[in-house]
Image (cartoon, grey):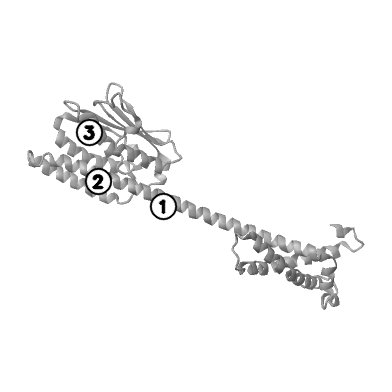
Amino acid sequence: MPRFASNAAWWFVLRASLAEWWAWGLLVPAIIAVDRRLPIAVNRLGTRLAVQIAIGIPATLVYSYVAALLKVMLGAMAWPDAIGLGPLYEALKGGFLWSLLVYLLVVGGWQAVQYSQHYLASQLRLERLERNFSEARLNVLRMQLDPHFLFNALNTISSLVVSQPKLARGMIEQLGDLLRLSLESGRRQQVHLSEELEFLGHYLAIQKTRFGDSLHVVVDVPASAYDVMVPSLILQPLVENAVRHGLSPRPGGGTVWVQATIDDAMLCITVEDDGVGLGDNWTDDRVGLGLGVTRERIATLHPTQDAGLQIDPREGGGTRVRVSIPTRAAGAHGNE
């Protein structure tokens, strides 16, 4: 802008300025190529700046000749002035420091791009590490559930092998179906609720064989909830806890209710029993392995959602366990 105040024609000043900035545009790829080949780490900013200042001195001299050539092509300079020591003399006379500053601005812009790329790459690596850690943690929790459930089922069968071998054989068949379903789920952390209900049905068949008419189970799950994704092996630990700790100590057994509802994009699963209850000395930190692992899995799968597992006394006696899972978030993680 100050050049327009001179006596020169405006179009002449404009073409001269365009030639100077276009010259930097032509040199930018070369500046970046040189910077990429520097054997200096990106985070060593001071060393790179010192080296770039040293490189910038000859680079600005090259720029002066490139700008002079473009001025000739645009008619803003005579050809004799663009050869020999003319451009070098003009650069040293007044524009050298300004050109060096522009060179450093180009280098600084490129340095900012590199820092941005490194930051994004590090963020992606961090996200992958966090995801891998979460998956590994979920797998460990899942592997804790499998032997826990298998041990309890085998313990139930062993109690009937001698006294009631026919019933024991039937329970072994049900256990085989359970193991098949468990293997089919593979490493999936979440499955459809309908698959969980099928798995639960085989488990309840084993328990009913053991307890007979003293165990009653009521399942009330609407068809609209069948396709919702839930953590695999989520129902069996809840029902096992109700049977083992709620009904087994109670003479005459009792009833277990399994209900599911969808309210405001939240799937709520409730398992209730009319057993002996939690007791006066019970605290929330005294949950067993099954409920503890289930709570950790829910927290890992939905860390930022309104999800969780809550244990309360049931009105009228017994225990109520309530699980809340966001249906939208659960569907997004369904293939994990």
* Residue wearing tag 1: 132
The disc placed on residue 147 is 2
Badge 3: few (under 14), some or many (20 or more) residues near its Cα, within 10 Å?
Answer: some
The disc placed on residue 24 is none
Badge 2: few (under 14), some or many (20 or more) residues near its Cα, within 10 Å?
Answer: few
Between the C-alphas of marks 3 and 1, the distance is 35 Å
* Residue wearing tag 3: 244
> Count the marks: how many?
3
Would you place residue 249 above or below residue 110 in this image? above
Which amino acid type is marked by label 2?
A: Pro
Between the C-alphas of marks 1 and 2, the distance is 23 Å
Q: Secondary structure at mark 2?
A: helix
Residue 72 in percent (x, y) is at 81, 73
Q: Secondary structure at mark 3?
A: helix
- Camera sees residue 134: yes
The residue under the point 29% across, 39% down is 290
The residue under the point 25% across, 43% down is 148
Would you place residue 26 above or below residue 286 in this image? below
Disc with the residue nearer the chain's start (1 vs 2) = 1
**Tags 3 and 2 in contact by the CB under 8 Å rule?**
no
Outermost residue toward the right? 7
The residue under the point 43% across, 36% down is 306
Q: Which quadrant would residue 104 be assigned to in this image?
A: bottom right
Which amino acid type is marked by label 1?
A: Asn
Which amino acid type is marked by label 3?
A: Arg
Quadrant of the rendering where the N terminus is positioned: bottom right
- Camera sees residue 335: no
